[in-house]
Amino acid sequence: MQDDISGVRLSGRQHAGDGTRYEVVEPATGRTIGHVTAGTGRDAARAVDVAAASLEGWRATPAPQRGAVLRAITRRLRTADDLAETVARETGKCLREASAELALAADYFDWYADLAHTLTDQAHSVRPGLRHLVRTGPVGVAAVLTPWNFPVSIPARKIAPALATGCAVVFKPSELSLLSSLAFAELCESELPEGLLNTVAGDGPEISGAWLDDSRVRLLHFTGSTAVGRTIARAAGAALTPVVMELGGRAPFIVLPDADLDEAADTLMVAKFRNNGASCIAANNIWVHHDIRADFLDRLAARVSALVPGDPLDERTTLGPVRTPEMAARLEGLVAALGSAGARVHQGRRPESSGWYVAPALIVDPATNRPEWREEVFGPVALVRSFADLKEPIIDASATAHGLAGYVCTGDAAAGAELLARLDVGIASVNVATPTTPEIPFGGRGDSGIGYEGGLPGLLPFLAHQSIAVPRP
């Protein structure tokens, strides 16, 4: 890895930034693996200048040609082994999960390459004597702001539809995934016409503020915490800039008495511990029917004990470190607080390492009025309660303002789908641990976000329409 790089990339090249110099620390070891010098608001303004200048040529490029460019990025991502290793080292996720993330990112570019072909003008003659032509094009420059936990697939989910529609992009990655996101941006730039993707790392309020102050930025696309999302939404509202936001979650995971217990335990292990638990759609509040409680907890505890924490690059590792020491301290404090309050704690292994590892934990019967139960865990700690009446988990799930994801495990898929319809969430699954694909809309309700990513709905915010009425003989 390069020791010192710039966090400003304009027109496919690095440009010296004069912002904060970030130290990139590998969470598995605590060692410094690089430095990135961030940009400032001035660099953010320059990025919009470059993007706006490139917009007209890309807008005029026929949709099949834009799709061909996206497919070239797809091919690069499918063989980007070095990038997968960078993602694993920088974020702490296992290498196999980093590789899966790149495969998902490639799928997003491939899917939106196909959808680019569907973006054609349409003629309508629905009223006597009148004909309408509806022209469809890009909104213009789109700003993309992303978190650290999926530093390739989340940007891909936003940037691919932007490019497919003919938009140009300005991109601010998280300061906790700079090496991964900058390498991803460079990969995309190698296949794109100059100036279509411009990256500025730096202070979030400063960079996003510069973009919201610029009338040429016609859409802001953000993934992050609900608190930050509210701040951005207020500023965007003042600027009348449309936003799409994917925010926090508190997903319920309900195991019904007719579920296959081994299958349910396996599903939960993925839904909870994938990506070291750092996923907005991770299972958060786990409910198990009283009749199967003991058997299910035995299976779950055995699986937690079998997790192998260690070096993310080691193929034997099944659980990596969390991203920062502050995250580790918060999770350890959560486990200690719930244990002191009377919950039963079962913990797996923690390696002897200078890295930021947290022993995976199963917390049984935490009180539902505890703040730890009401908040998003975002780490390898599972909170489990039992129920006799299905009303209890439904009422608990309805008491939260978040509505991103929900899971049910049952032997009756139709009944499971009917139960999920009673939950106010945007993403739901029956006996499936990873419910999202590029073809399907991804989005939450309430405090979990505004709008959708993925599928056809993920394309629509990047489109502008003009209707032209003419007389018809």
Image: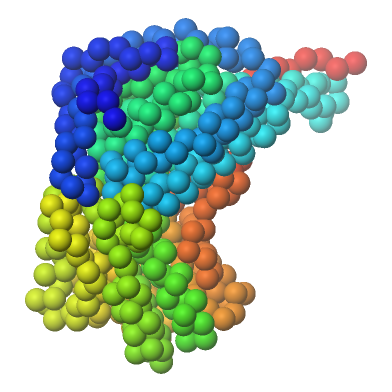
Image location of residue 180, percent across then percent down: 34, 34
Image location of residue 40, percent across then percent down: 22, 18
Q: Look at the picture and state if 240 lies above or below 58.
A: below
* Residue at x-position 54% and y-position 69%: 430
Which residue in the rendered view is the most extreme toward the bottom? Answer: 291
* Residue at x-position 52% and y-position 36%: 79
**Location of residue 203 (image quadrant):** top left
**Location of residue 17 (image quadrant):** top left
Q: Quadrant of the N terminus?
A: top left
Which residue in the rendered view is the most extreme toward the left? Answer: 340
Q: Look at the picture and state if 112 lies above or below 360.
A: above
Q: Look at the picture and state if 396 lies above or below 355.
A: below
Q: How is colour applied across the structure in the image?
A: rainbow
Residue sitting nearer the eye, 473 or 100: 100
Image location of residue 37, percent across then percent down: 21, 21
Q: Quadrant of the C terminus?
A: top right
Residue sitting nearer the eye, 33 or 406: 33
* Residue at x-position 78% and y-position 24%: 123
Direction from residue 403 to residue 435 in the image, left or right? right
Image location of residue 466, percent across then percent down: 64, 20
- Residue 396 appears in the picture as rendered: no
Q: Look at the picture and state if 283 lies above or below 211.
A: below
Residue sitting nearer the eye, 39 or 392: 39
* Residue at x-position 61% and y-position 30%: 71
- Residue 306 appears in the picture as rendered: yes
